[in-house]
Image (tube, helix red, strand yellow):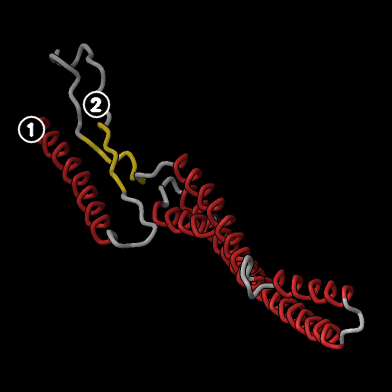
Amino acid sequence: MSGLFQIFSVSKNGMFAQQTALHTNAHNIANANTDGYSVQRVNLKTTEPFGMPALTTPAEPGQLGTGVKVDSITRARDTFLDAQIRKENSTQGKYGVREQFLSEIESIFMEPSDEGLASSLTKFWDSWHQLATNPESSTARTLVAQNGDALATDISHHYTQLEDMERNAGDLIRNDVFDVASTLTQIRDLNEQIRAVSISGRNPNDLMDRRDLLLDNLS
């Protein structure tokens, strides 16, 4: 009769293990479109076999097992790749912002072109050259004054645009600092939850996914 109960016990252990595997698969399917979700896998291991043969137990061809159990539920994730991706995202972000502001500066000065500041400077110095060649010419004096006014207007306009760009950059930095502070607070809270769950002997997979997603966004 004891052998029959042992068979039932092995079957029960197997059913519980497969039930956990089915539940995990359903969880994976349900989160197929969840941003930052890592596929979870169930790691199985054999349960402790029956004790070593003794004088009071019959000899068996092999040590009898007692079934299977869930060893752990882990994420299919590579921490090394995570670190590399975040590093490259950070580098891409740095050069992306640099390109953005350099493009804005280029559009302000419009160089090289006939409408840029260099063109106004050239006209201004050419008018002075004409005045130096013919100092008695009222036309040359008028041209110097006109080109001087035009140059001053261009410089003032460029300065205003650069001030606006500086102001926008400051606003962007302040917003980013606020977002970073908020993200770090969320990561701190998640770390506390992850620690509490880990102490209990379980893997806080979903919490770690949320933390990794925040780290990805932070990079």
Residue 74 in view: no
Q: Which residue is drawn at 22% across and 44% down?
A: 17
Q: Residue furthest right?
A: 136
Left of 37 or right of it: where is 157? right
**The quarter of the displayed image where residue 102 is located:** bottom right
Residue 12 in view: yes
Quadrant of the drawing holding the N terminus: top left
> Which is more foreground, mark 1 or mark 2?
2
What secondary structure is marked by label 1? Answer: loop
The residue under label 2 is: 49
Q: Earlier in the sequence, mark 1 or mark 2?
A: 1
**176 or 97, which is in the foreground?**
97
**The quarter of the displayed image where residue 120 is located:** bottom right
**81 or 200, which is in the foreground?**
81
Residue 194 position within the rendered picture, expressed as x and y whole percent measured from the top left: 49, 53
Left of 155 or right of it: where is 40? left
**Of the residues shown, which amino acid type is indicated by label 1?**
Met
Relative to 30, residue 110 above or below: below
Residue 10 position within the rendered picture, expressed as x and y whole percent measured from the top left: 16, 36
Relative to 210, residue 153 above or below: below
The residue under label 1 is: 1
**34 or 98, which is in the foreground?**
98
Mark-to-mark CA distance, 1 and 2: 19 Å
Residue 55 position within the rendered picture, expressed as x and y whole percent measured from the top left: 21, 11
**Of the residues shown, which amino acid type is indicated by label 2?**
Pro
Residue 152 position within the rendered picture, expressed as x and y whole percent measured from the top left: 79, 81
Q: Which residue is drawn at 61% across and 59% down?
A: 98
Quadrant of the drawing holding the C terminus: bottom right
Q: Which residue is drawn at 12% across and 31% down?
A: 2
What secondary structure is marked by label 2? Answer: loop
Q: Residue at x 83, y 75 (%)?
A: 130
